[in-house]
């Protein structure tokens, strides 16, 4: 059962982009214990951040947690540079992977979801990507985390809270990702499981995304139970 409106319309996806970033990272020669050095570019990232400092070193796995739980742009850029030596080369891999996955209405201009003229995706593409992404245990697990603590090699600790307020509040909510920019508006991919039924909600440029998502999840469960 599917409810949709303008599901193939390309729109700015904000930080829902980071789902593809995580997929590209995990499909590579991924080592969560590898040390990543934070560049000046990453340390200077705008928007939502973990608070990383230039030349700090952290484990790749900790940065992935910051990317998925807190949607941290500094962690996102640090991982992209570590993976591909440059952000531009990483974005090339993101677009190649989108084509391989059949995401026909998706094109990336950066790994973090910042507004850019050619940075677009659609609700259907994001649903397909999300279902693929949760096959990776680390993505599925981090999507449910309400808080994570990172530690730099020098011992500085950073505690980050989730950007998903439905975790622990909406029965069955187990993820997945939020996003917001001035052009994209409020975005979210919500995944919930209850009584053996799985529900997905993808919202782009939504009003009151969390209230809307929670209401859609409840409506979907009630409709499924009436069948």
Image (tube, grey):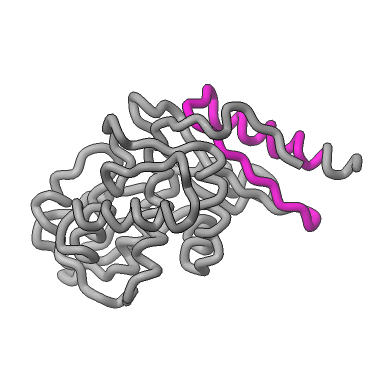
Q: x%, y% of residue 226?
A: 90, 40
Counting from the top left corner in percent of width and height, residue 218 is at: 74, 37
One can see residue 46 in this view? yes
Residue at 25 percent of width and 60 percent of height: 79
Q: Residue furthest top?
A: 207
Is residue 227 positioned above or below 181 on the image?
below
Instruction: Based on the picture, tell me whether residue 30 belongs to the magenta stretch.
Output: no
Q: What segment is highlighted magenta in the picture?
A: 195-222
Q: Is residue 221 left or right of residue 164?
A: right
Question: Relative to 178, does residue 132 appear above or below in the rendering?
Answer: below
Left or right for 161, reference 88: right
The quadrant of the image that shows the N terminus is: top right
Q: Residue furthest right?
A: 226
Relative height, residue 205 to residue 194 (above, below): above
**Residue 169 image position (x, y, % from top left):** 62, 43
Name the residue located 39 percent from the left edge and 69 percent from the top edge: 27
How many marks the image carries: the answer is 0
Residue 11: image location, x then y, percent: 43, 30
| Residue 152 in view, yes or no | no
Q: Nearer the viewer, residue 39 or 161?
A: 39
Dividing the picture into quadrants, the one containing residue 223 is top right
| Quadrant in the rendering for residue 113 | top left
Residue placed most toward the observer, 196 or 126 = 126
Which quadrant, please, contains the C terminus?
A: top right
Q: Tell me the residue at 27%/54% (across/down).
A: 92
Residue located at (53% from left, 50% from top)? 176
Magenta stretch encompasses residue 198: yes
Q: Is residue 29 above or below residue 8?
A: below
């Amino acid at each position: 059962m599917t409810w949709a409106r303008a599901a193939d319309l390309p729109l700015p996806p904000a930080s829902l982009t980071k789902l593809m970033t995580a997929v590209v990272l995990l499909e590579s020669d991924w080592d969560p214990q590898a040390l990543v050095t934070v560049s000046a570019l990453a340390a200077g990232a705008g928007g939502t951040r973990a608070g990383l400092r230039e030349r700090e070193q952290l484990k790749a796995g900790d940065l992935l947690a910051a990317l998925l739980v807190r949607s941290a742009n500094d962690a996102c850029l640090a991982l992209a540079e570590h993976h591909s030596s440059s952000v531009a080369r990483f974005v090339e891999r993101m677009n190649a992977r989108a084509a391989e996955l059949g995401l026909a209405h998706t094109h990336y201009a950066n790994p973090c979801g910042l507004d850019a003229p050619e940075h677009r995706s659609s609700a259907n593409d994001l649903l397909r990507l999300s279902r693929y992404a949760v096959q990776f245990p680390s993505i599925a697990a981090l999507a449910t985390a309400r808080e994570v603590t990172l530690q730099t090699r020098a011992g500085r600790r950073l505690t980050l809270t989730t950007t998903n307020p439905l975790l622990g509040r909406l029965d069955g909510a187990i993820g997945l990702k939020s996003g917001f920019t001035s052009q994209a508006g409020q975005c979210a991919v919500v995944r919930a499981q209850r009584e053996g039924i799985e529900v997905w909600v993808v919202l782009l440029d939504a009003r009151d995304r969390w209230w809307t998502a929670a209401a859609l999840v409840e409506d979907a469960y009630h409709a499924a139970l009436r069948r």
